[in-house]
Image (cartoon, rainbow, N blue to C red):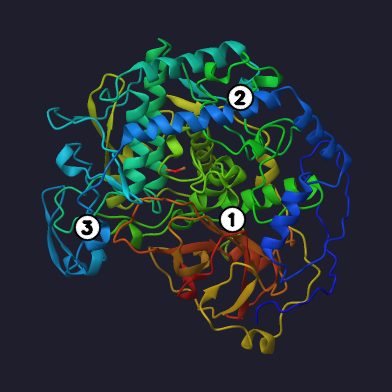
Amino acid sequence: MAAAATPSGVSWLSPNPRGLKGQGNQVTARTVQGTMSCRAEERTRSTASGLNSSSAASGRRRQHQDSPSRLVLNLSLLEATARTGAEESKDLTEGDEDEDDATIPQALLHRRQLLWGATGTFSYLTSAGFGLAAPVPPANLSPESCQEVPDQQQKLNCCLPDGSQLTPIDFEFEADLPMRIRQPAHILSKDEEYVKKYNQAYVLMKQLPDDDPRSFAAQWHIHCAFCEGAYLEPNNPNNLKLQYHGSWTFLPWHRMYLYFHERILGDLIGDPEFALPVWNWDNQRDADGGNQMPRMFAPFYFGKPLSMNPQDSELSKAIRNPEHFPPEHVRLDRGNYYDDMGTVFDSNLALMHRAVVTPVSSTDFLGKPYRAGQAADTAGPGSIEVNGHNIVHVWTGSNYLKLRPDHEDMGTFLYAARDPIFYSHHSNVDRMWTVWKILQIDQSTRRGSRKREDPTDPDFLNTQFAFYNHKKQLVHVKISQTLDTERLRYKYQALDSDQDWINYTFADSGQEKPSPEEIARLVTDKVLKKDKSVSFALTRIEPTPSQGRSAEDLEETLVVKGVQVPKNSFMLYKVFINLPDAGVSTPLGIYNFVGVITHVPHKASHGLGHNRKVDFRLSIGASLKALGIKDLEQVSVTFVPGGQEDDVEFDGVDVEFN
Ligand code: C2O
């Protein structure tokens, strides 16, 4: 049953937009429209242009459109287009070998391949890598280990400067470095000295020749190389590609990517205390605050252009969605444009809570294991990657006037890191890892007192990454060295606004739960629809003690299995428990909402050349408890589409404990 047409006008209590100054307990009536077409809503939204019926909001928008910055905005767009043209002709070479990933024979994925592990021990690889125990070795940065990334007909060379003549050094902590304090970008945007310095660092970085590993080209290619599988996994006979997204390597690898990038920027301007700004998009407090594209990155810097020529700002040179320039607010619930901003902010907080506070296990938060000899596709992303991270990527990138189907820069992993805002966005994602680790809240396990911990698996701790440092040395760093930012000599300014999503309380939907008969009648077709909600029955199981934990301390996880993510387009579904009538307008601040599943376009060919199959994990224990659902009681799971282009097949829903 696909939440059949029930425009029954159910009223929603729109919970108080917490943390917003001067907000009372305002109650807004909402209507659930289970079958409303997202496309139709998308159309209404773009024709209406003003998204908000509230006069304050539309007033802001009018002001935005009439502002002198509009000229600059158009210039910026032209500039951005021109730059990409130049960049592409430099980076893309004609591909004549046509060696698509699809041609790698499946037969290469033999069972029980003998693998020479990085530690010098032998391990057995069973069926695409499961059951193998060995940490992923660092990339070999030689041209032979790197392949061009197929990008439609062309090939993009993301390979990094040749490191084969360098002797790698092991990463060491430098206790005498000054502490670098990463502060919110919307605050730093008012600090002209900081912005000029930061901008100057990129001026200098862009002056370096491309074969210098500190150059801007080499810096953004790091991301393009390791999100698209340009480098082969060393010592592996199966042509497996290194891929640090979609698994427990996501957070530590990006942490060290930012670490070296920040050190290089600081070194170029001779400031060892230089710290990256943090795009505080989770902050819903300040009307012109964190939850907007930070002013320092906008072509019109803080109300006035840096100069009339946006070319002068390296921070604004990127392809972005001009409709999302300030004062537009980030909407983490991308699938919806609510009438009132209060619901937008409230849904943002609800999503943040589900992304960071609800998951207590590292598997659900950081992602699943990725070990040597394992196709990275077979791991699975954690909530930190799938929620705000992916959504803000796509929100920032452009497909303005349909000119950019690839949603550059930020909206596709291939190009994301050539926008300087990438590093500020990822600072915030990295910051959330530090917040998650010290949270004392456990609403998810039965006992309710589980402590959060990074994985202690030796394969996690001993996985190594290769980076170039600010002295152009080749450095190998182990994940065990990435876990404490203070040892890396940086930290984040503590932000009060975190409390708004940490202490967020969900509301009752006021809806009856579906009866067992209704659940029994739900669809069995394993397809998530692009234009309507679909619901499935979830059969629950009893936890069995595992990993040294009693059943009382395990987290119940909804696994959405084998989702065939459309590799070249965006995907988003909002997921609700026991609410088959959930539709695009259902706000997220209710117990039933358990999180989202999303995918950011990669563009380049992936893995074995097919759509990737991804297992998504959503921690549901907190929702089940709040909804008063008893052990083993069947529930429904509803997927509400958020504006993707196609239906998506998957293998069904399941429960796991971890
Ligand atoms: Cu490497 Cu934000 O992705």
Lower sequence index among marks 2 and 3:
2
Mark pair 2, 3: CA separation: 45 Å
Q: Element type at marker 2?
A: loop
Q: Quadrant of residue 399?
A: top right
Give the vertical position of 187 relative to 20 (above or below). above
The residue carrying mark 2 is 299
| Relative image position of residue 124 (x, y in whole percent) | 15, 64
Please tell me which residue is depicted at 19% across the width and 51% down the height of the picture.
97
Q: Mark 1 and ligand 1: say if the CB distance to the nearest ligand atom is below 8 Å.
A: no
Residue 177 in sight from this viewpoint: no
Q: Which of the two residues, 649 or 403, is positioned nearer the viewer here?
A: 403
Q: Element type at marker 3?
A: loop
User: Which amino acid type corresponds to the residue marked 2 in the rendered image?
Assistant: Pro
User: Which amino acid type corresponds to the residue marked 3 in the rendered image?
Assistant: Gly
Give the vertical position of 197 relative to 466 (above or below). above
Please tell me which residue is depicted at 50% across the width and 21% down the height of the picture.
314
In this picture, residue 133 sits left or right of residue 320: left
Lower sequence index among marks 3 and 1:
1
Which image quarter has ligand 1? top left
Disc 2: CA contacts within 10 A as few (<14), some (14-19) or many (>=20): many
Mark pair 3, 1: CA separation: 31 Å
Q: Element type at marker 1?
A: loop
Q: Quadrant of the C terminus?
A: bottom left
The residue carrying mark 1 is 358
| Relative image position of residue 587 (x, y in whole percent) | 74, 58
In the drawing, what numbered circle is on residue 373?
3
Residue 266 in sight from this viewpoint: yes
Please tell me which residue is depicted at 68% across the width and 86% down the height of the picture.
518
